Amino acid sequence: MTLKTPIRAGLAAAALVACAFLLSHGVAAEPAAPAAPTFNKGDNAWMLTSSVLVLLMTIPGLALFYGGLVRSKNALSVLAHVFYTVCIVTIIWVLYGYSLTFTGGSAFIGGLDKIFLKGVTTDSQAATFSVGVTIHELIYVCFQMTFAAITPALIVGAFAERMRFAAVALFIPLWVTFVYFPIAHMVWYWAGPDAIDAAAKALAAATDPTAKAAAQAKLDEVMADAGLVFQWGAIDFAGGTVVHINAGIAGLVGALLVGKRIGYGKEIMAPHSLTLSMVGASLLWVGWFGFNAGSNLEANGGAALAMTNSFVATAAAAMSWMFAEWLVKGKPSLLGIISGCIAGLVAVTPAAGYAGPMGALVLGLIVGVVCMYFVTTVKNALGYDDSLDVFGVHCIGGIVGAIGTGILVNPALGGVGIMDYTTGKIADYEFVTQVIAQCKAVLTTLVWSGVVTFILYKVVDILVGLREPVDKEREGLDITDHGERAYTM
Amino acid sequence: MKIVVAIIKPFKLDEVRDALTAMGVHGMTVTEVKGYGRQKGHTEIYRGAEYAVTFLPKIKIEVAVATEQVDKAIETITTAAKTGQIGDGKIFVLALETAVRIRTGETDAAAL
């Protein structure tokens, strides 16, 4: 009986996948109908699945990865930070986060049109990257909710083992409000393909000069209805800037402001369970397919490319970190393999739907070595205590990925190019323009997140205090903050 | 009577136990301990952080034997626990004044 159930479930899942595949192919075979966007159940099913996969990345994936890397006296506190972050951000997201991120307003932040999810019903549609194809907006709300939840959860690794829970509890809601929502809006908010396509078609159809001018004005208005970074032409498929650079720099600022752990550099602070960390890293990789391939918003070839790249770059980075460490430090470590895995996932995040598989392979090989060099050598030279290398892996890996995306999107390098929705064709690739746009996106994220996060930590420090007293930190945050232990043996 | 305390490599425990049983020692107490002698420990590396681990895991065996058995016990443990590599451990012998078997109240040699 116990054997039969999973088999039946597996068969049902296989049948579902087959149905989704047939459905998407069936739709693709029909003549294109530009007007009246339609729901595709395959797309919706994939996005429902992706949303849950991204949740899996955070809990238990990230929680276990981080939890295993700290000392056993603080393991529970890290698990609590991550789980708290997921829950509090989920609530904030439906109250005002979604509205501030994904409605028009200014180039910096959205408005309050959809506050409390006002007007978002089971009939509402959200744009994808194809003209005439939408998904249910509620799925888009949930999908993006999981991104908003994982990003601040990444930060807690930087100040792990010493930040008070009360400080974390206050910092996280402030951070998503003043840093995550604006940056996600700047990078990802746009009017959508249907609006641009309609405006471009109206311009093409306009005959007399007055109508042409009006249509051009309308097209300009639609193109300007987007976030600042989006308007610059910077591309970020699944969140290299929004998620990783953003969380990485916020982590570094936190690590610097809260100060080093007591005994840092003198006492042993070895991970208490690399077994848990390996389980966590594996769950992160699995969940990351929802993150990267899900960011395609449709279950089609683009999602397949993002999935392929998320396999290839990750494996390549894990191998390059491991072999580099073997060469330089003498031993190939499991921690090196799983750290490389995360670095590869980070770097391929912005590139997943833009680079070709060979581009992703090169990107992975490069980022594994760069991040390894950073966390083993540069960090020690600089002397700051970023407990779990949030900056070294997420920010540095994110920068490699963000700039690498601008290069690897080039069709001549196997990339897919960038769609120009005003013409309905792939735009001509220009190296300098694209790389400059990518660099501007990176700098904007670094400056906005760095400065605003600094202010937020100061506010939190004044209100509740960032750090536990020395004795409590020595005893461990599990007991002092939570009154319980990760392990009672 | 004597107490023989031996610090040995953890993976040698079974061999030592079998050898002692064969020579007629019918009980022992075992503790997982950490320490260092000439072996000094090793280095562990986690990303960039290198830690010198000076306390290595060892097994401490305590056996109570009659005085005339001591030499034989020392020889048995030495033979069984030896690898010839640094870190094989040490044996200490202490005087034992009294022994009591709790169940029966037997004392000294009868209690061993």
Image (cartoon, coloured by chain):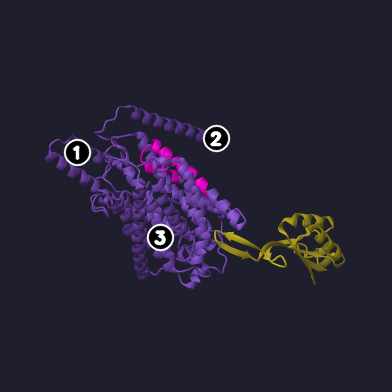
- Chain on which label 2 sits: A
Q: Assign the N terminus of chain A to one quadrant of the image.
A: top right
Residue linked to disc 1: A203
Q: Is residue A86 above or below residue A425?
A: below
Q: Secondary structure under badge 3?
A: helix
Q: Position of residue A424 (x, y in %)?
A: 29, 37
Query: Chain in yellow?
Result: B
Q: Position of residue B98 (x, y in %)?
A: 79, 70
Residue linked to disc 3: A249
| Neighbour tally class for label 3: few under 14, some 14-19, many 20 plus, Cα within 10 Å | many
Residue at coordinates 52% horizontally, 46% vertically from top-left?
A316
**Rendering quarter of residue B12:** bottom right
Q: Is residue A408 visible?
A: yes
What is the three-letter code of the residue carrying label 3?
Answer: Ile
Q: How many marks?
A: 3
Q: Position of residue A310 (x, y in %)?
A: 46, 44
Mark 2 or mark 1: which comes first in sequence? 2
Observer-nearest of A438 and B4: A438
Q: Which secondary structure class fits the magenta region best?
A: helix
| Neighbour tally class for label 2: few under 14, some 14-19, many 20 plus, Cα within 10 Å | few
Disc 3 + disc 2, Cβ < 8 Å: no
Gap in Å between the C-alphas at discs 2 and 1? 62 Å
Specify whether residue A296 is painted magenta.
Answer: yes
Q: Do discs 2 and 1 belong to a common subunit?
A: yes
For discs 2 and 1, the disc positioned in front in the rendered view:
1
Q: Is residue A412 above or below residue A254?
A: above
Q: Do discs 3 and 2 belong to a common subunit?
A: yes
Residue linked to disc 2: A3
Observer-nearest of B92 and B79: B79
Q: Left or right of B40: which side holds B110?
A: right
What is the three-letter code of the residue carrying label 2?
Answer: Leu
Q: Which residues are magenta?
A: A288-317
